Structures are given as structure tokens and as C-alpha cells.
Amino acid sequence: MKTAVLHSIILFVLAILFTAIIVNGPLSADDPAASPDDQAKEDLSRVVYPSTEGIRWKPVFIRPQDTLESLYGKDWELVARFNRVDRRHVYPGMTIKSPENMEDIRDYTPMPPVYEPARNHEKYILVNMEEQWLGAYENGVLKFSMPAATGRPGNETPTGLFRIDARHKNHTSSLYKTEDDQAQYPMDYAMRFHVGADDVAFWIHARDLPGRPASHGCIGLFDESMQKRLFNQPDIPVLMDAKRLYEWAVGEEDYEGPDSGELELIEDGPVVEVVGRNPAYLPSPPRKARDARR
């Protein structure tokens, strides 16, 4: 008797579920997107840069078959720079900002073409943390600029005026290791600009660029050659900003004698100014292309 009753109850529940499916259809899943709670670790469309407000873009979800090269062809580097991200950090499941018109970002830089405080300096480095970008100035005129990754929340890069006082082409961190804990973290093309009261040094150097503040306080620049050596990707290194800035700021043309690759103190290095604060994050991923403000 009990078995018959239990059987009837099961049939009744199944009938209700079947009816619900027929009438209402199965529950639909959300479109692929990174978690809204990830603090922009996976969703770069949530990172707010003031300079992108006038550029039309849409969030693009990265599928397993996608790479920057497959999505954007010869313009992949423009998109990488616009997102402040290297190729190793563009992976399935994340979201990037995709410009609607590549011409809008062909000469993109958030740095001012002329910076008056740098007028009396032969070489001057300006770092804007809110933009995650660095500009190299000669007598106040912008020579070139590049994406940067500053200190993550809780380890923010110090702001203010500093001066490069040491170079170390083959520097490695004495405090931090690589993700697999197999080696000390490489800091190729390193230039020291500040030593804190606790004797912790802050450098501009080569590192990963994941499209957001990510360091322990240093300022990181593209160097795919280092990533090829350490992680065996990308196949052909292209983005080499750390080397470019190093050679411009503390290269052999300005300092007598060959660069030994070891730690060397230098005099009268370029001024480094760090301004602003880390970028804000949108509370949730945008679902539609943003309209340029008129």
C-alpha cells in the first residue's frame, strides 16, 4: 500500500514538472559573461578609464577559439593596448573592450601631448594611475606613451615626484615568485624610482599586463620577450615597451660605458611623476556598446 502511494506521489510530481516545462519552457541561461563579482579580474569592460568615454566600444566575450589575432588581424596590437592587456592574459571566459572603429584607437593615448611641468626637463616620465598609462616626455613634449600596470588595491603605487636612481637590466624580485613558485619573479629592464621608509624599492620594469592594477606597487610595462622565456608564449614576441623605455631613459647613449646588466646606480636620472588613483570599476558588466559622449 505504501509503495503504491509513493509511486502515485512520484508520478504526480513528474507530471507537474513536465507541465511546467511545456508551458513555460526550460529556464534560460545567461549569455556567457564573466562574474559580476570578479572586480574586473576577468571582465575588462568594467574598468573605467576617463579617456575612453569618447570612444564607441562594445564588450566582447572571449571564446575558446578566440585570440586577439583571430579577432582583429593586424590590428590586434591596437586592441591589446586599448585594453592594457597582453596576449597571455586574453583567455576563454573573459571579456574585453572591442572598439567599433579601429581608426578611433589607431593613435590612442590618454596622455597630454604637452605637459608643462616637464618643460624644463630633458626627460620626464609621467604615470597616470587612473588611466593605467605612462608617458615619456622630452622638454614637456610627449615622445611616446604606453600602457602600464600599477599597484593593485592594498598595494597602490606611491604618488608624487621621484627620480630614477638605479638601473638593472636583468633584475629579479627578492620578495616575489612566479605563479608556479618555481623562480623569483623577473623584472627585466628595471629602473628604481623610489625606496620607501621600510626599505622596499619601487621600480618601473617588465611584467605581465592583465588589463588592471596588478603589482605590489611597482609600475609594469609590456615585455613579451620575458613572457616567452618564462611561459613559452607568445610564439613571436612583439610588445616590448619595457625595453623601449629603459633604453630611452637610462640607455648607453646617456650613460657612459656599456650596460653590464647588473645593478648600477645612476645620477641625474629622469624625473618620475605618479599621479591619480587606481581606476574605478563598473558595478556590473555593460551589455551594450557604449555611446560616445557628444
Image: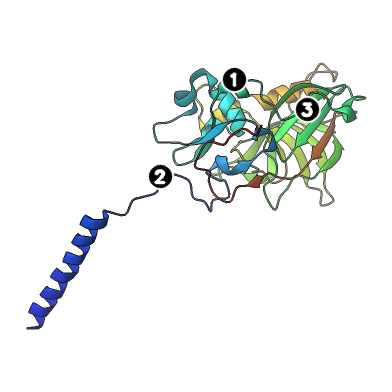
Residue 37 horizontal side relative to residue 279, left or right: left
Location of residue 82 in the rendering, given as x and y in whole percent from the top left corner: 61, 30
Res 94 visible: yes
Location of residue 269 in the rendering, given as x and y in whole percent from the top left corner: 86, 28
The mark found on residue 31 in the picture is 2
Q: Badge 1: how crowded within 10 Å, few (<14), some, or many (20+)?
A: few
Picture quadrant of residue 246: top right
Find numbered disc 1 in the image and state the secondary structure of the residue it sits on: helix
Residue 222 horizontal side relative to residue 140, left or right: left
| Three-letter amino acid code at the position of disc 1 | Glu
Residue drawn at x 59%, y 27% as measured from the top left:
224
| Three-letter amino acid code at the position of disc 3 | Pro
Q: Nearer the viewer, residue 24 or 4?
A: 24
Colour mapping used in the image: rainbow
Res 171 visible: no
The mark found on residue 268 in the picture is none
Q: Residue under circle 1?
A: 103
Residue drawn at x 72%, y 45% as measured from the top left:
217
First of labels 2, 3 by sequence position: 2
First of labels 1, 3 by sequence position: 1
First of labels 2, 1 by sequence position: 2
| Three-letter amino acid code at the position of disc 2 | Asp
Cα distance between the residues tagged 2 and 3: 38 Å
Cα distance between the residues tagged 1 and 3: 19 Å
Q: Residue under circle 3?
A: 112
Find numbered disc 3 in the image and state the secondary structure of the residue it sits on: loop
In the rendered image, the quadrant that contains the C terminus is top right
